[in-house]
């Protein structure tokens, strides 16, 4: 180090790399460096003090008329520019509003014409379905008529986008509705059908869950379904006025999260089996998942929710009706996950069955629902004592990377509803086949009803 520094063959080595103990003149150089830094700091401080005095002096002095005139002129120019920009923006907004009003009037006229045609028409269901198909709309998207000059999809999208930009459309008030949406789910672009701007797509893939395990006849049923457009068209209604669409069936088939109405359909199929062989099953009562989540998530005090439950669930609000039942099923939804609560009426016991165990959040949701049930039963004069809550640890677990919690809930209900000892005869490995079979069951039922 000394040789290289004193012969000046290259710059001195980095002080961090080579410690000061190896540098001969480091203490001396450091003293000189510190002194220079202190002198520089003193000079900078003096300059700052002088600048501050000059600024204070300028502020205390009165501004000359010419300077005042210059400042006022600059402010006037800035204000003029601001006013011009505001006027231009207002003109643009007015133009957009006029254009939107024209489009909106056109839509209302077309809608009025279509409703008049529907009212006077005596066509059958087939012709009505054909008219809806020609409109390019599902039952959820009615609003475009079959008048001679209908508005195309792109033009309608522009109108809706314009309405959002100018802020002329108000958001609908909160509805007492619920839909399960997988917010944080990572989607596989190859396995997901995206419906954008009213353009339904066809599913080109055929590697759906459990395809190798199905018989050929059932495969053909699914292949026929996949040849249709995957959109919001209704496929099947359940007993509680809910329904599943083609998008929902597609989600079941390709391993996505299953919606509440599909869980209700799963229990509906179970009820039909119970009616055929009633001696093999307990007497069960089921609250639709939509209603459970509605009462579960409603931001109101327990007494208010209890009164609402009594008015909404008359078949559960009397002691005589409840005493005829063995088991009550409630499907709970917490943080994108379905889990089951079963109330044994005779034993006054609430059992929690969850395919993901040990979560404090799921357990807290279950406890809150049991508290609400205790208040409801006491208010209706059904039970005075609170339910005994037990978290079952024997039911099967789902894989951490799967979205099969709804299928586990359906299988839990099927297993628990049978008389005798509970035997869990399924596992995570059976889920692909169960998805395919559930899909076939929905499509077959819907086809038979049609």
Image (cartoon, rainbow, N blue to C red):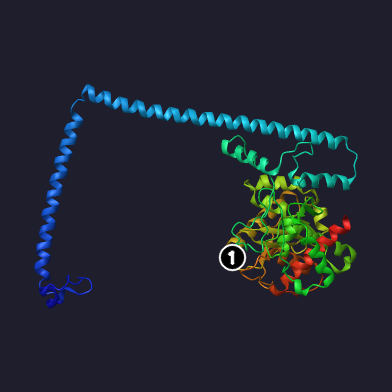
Q: How many marks?
A: 1
Vertical order, 382 against 128 (above or below): below
Q: Determine which quarter of the picture holds residue 35.
A: bottom left
x, y percent for residue 391: 65, 67
x, y percent for residue 326: 80, 62
Vertical order, 2 against 319 (above or below): below
> Of residues 170 and 364, which is closer to you in this image?
170
Q: Which residue in the rendered view is the most extreme toward the top?
A: 65
x, y percent for residue 102: 66, 30
Vertical order, 121 against 63 (above or below): below
> Of residues 252 and 337, which is closer to you in this image?
252
The residue sitting at 76% across, 65% down in the picture is 413
Q: Determine which quarter of the picture holds residue 331.
A: bottom right
Looking at the rendered image, the quarter that the C terminus falls into is bottom right
For mark 1, give the secondary structure: loop
Left or right of 276: which side holds 286?
Answer: left
Looking at the rendered image, the quarter that the N terminus falls into is bottom left
x, y percent for residue 66: 23, 23
Q: Which residue is mark 1?
A: 359
Dot 1: within a 10 Å radius of its alpha carbon, few (fewer than 14), some, or many (20 or more) residues? few
Left or right of 164: which side holds 114?
Answer: right
Q: Determine which quarter of the picture holds residue 421.
A: bottom right
């Amino acid at each position: 180090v000394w040789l290289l520094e004193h012969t000046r063959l290259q710059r001195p080595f980095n002080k961090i790399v080579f410690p000061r103990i190896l540098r001969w003149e480091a203490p001396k150089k450091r003293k000189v460096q510190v002194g220079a830094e202190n002198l520089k700091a003193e000079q900078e401080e003096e300059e700052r003090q002088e600048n501050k005095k000059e600024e204070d002096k300028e502020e205390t002095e009165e501004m000359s008329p010419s300077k005042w005139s210059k400042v006022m002129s600059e402010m006037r120019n800035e204000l003029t520019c601001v006013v011009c920009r505001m006027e231009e923006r207002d003109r643009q907004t007015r133009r957009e509003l006029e254009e939107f009003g024209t489009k909106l009037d056109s839509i209302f006229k077309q809608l009025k014409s279509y409703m008049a045609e529907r009212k006077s028409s005596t066509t059958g269901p087939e012709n009505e379905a054909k008219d809806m198909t020609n409109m390019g709309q599902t039952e959820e998207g009615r609003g475009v008529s079959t008048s001679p000059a209908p508005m195309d999809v792109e033009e309608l999208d522009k109108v809706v986008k314009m309405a959002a930009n100018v802020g002329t459309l108000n958001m609908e008030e909160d509805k007492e509705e619920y839909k399960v949406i997988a917010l944080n789910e990572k989607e596989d672009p190859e396995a997901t059908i995206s419906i954008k701007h009213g353009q339904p797509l066809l599913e080109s893939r055929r590697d759906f869950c459990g395809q190798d395990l199905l018989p050929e006849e059932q495969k053909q049923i699914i292949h026929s379904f996949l040849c249709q457009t995957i959109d919001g068209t209704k496929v099947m209604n359940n007993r509680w006025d809910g329904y599943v669409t083609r998008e929902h069936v597609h989600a079941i088939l390709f391993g996505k999260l299953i919606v509440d109405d599909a869980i209700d359909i799963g229990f509906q199929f179970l009820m039909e089996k119970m009616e055929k062989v009633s001696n093999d099953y307990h007497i069960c009562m089921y609250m639709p998942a939509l209603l459970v989540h509605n009462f579960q998530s409603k931001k109101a005090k327990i007494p208010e929710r209890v009164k609402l439950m009594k008015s909404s669930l008359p078949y559960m609000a009397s002691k005589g009706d409840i005493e005829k039942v063995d088991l009550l099923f409630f499907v709970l939804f917490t943080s994108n996950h379905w889990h089951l609560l079963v109330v044994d009426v005779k034993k006054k016991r609430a059992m929690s069955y969850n395919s993901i165990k040990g979560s404090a959040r799921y357990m807290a949701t279950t406890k809150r629902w049991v508290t609400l049930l205790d208040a409801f039963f006491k208010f209706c004069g059904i039970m005075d004592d609170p339910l005994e809550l037990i978290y079952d640890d024997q039911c099967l677990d789902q894989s951490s990377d799967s979205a099969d919690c709804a299928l586990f809930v359906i299988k839990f209900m099927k297993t628990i509803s049978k008389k005798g000892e509970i035997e869990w005869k399924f596992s995570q490995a059976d889920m692909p086949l169960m998805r395919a079979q559930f899909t076939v069951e929905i499509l077959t039922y819907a086809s038979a009803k049609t």
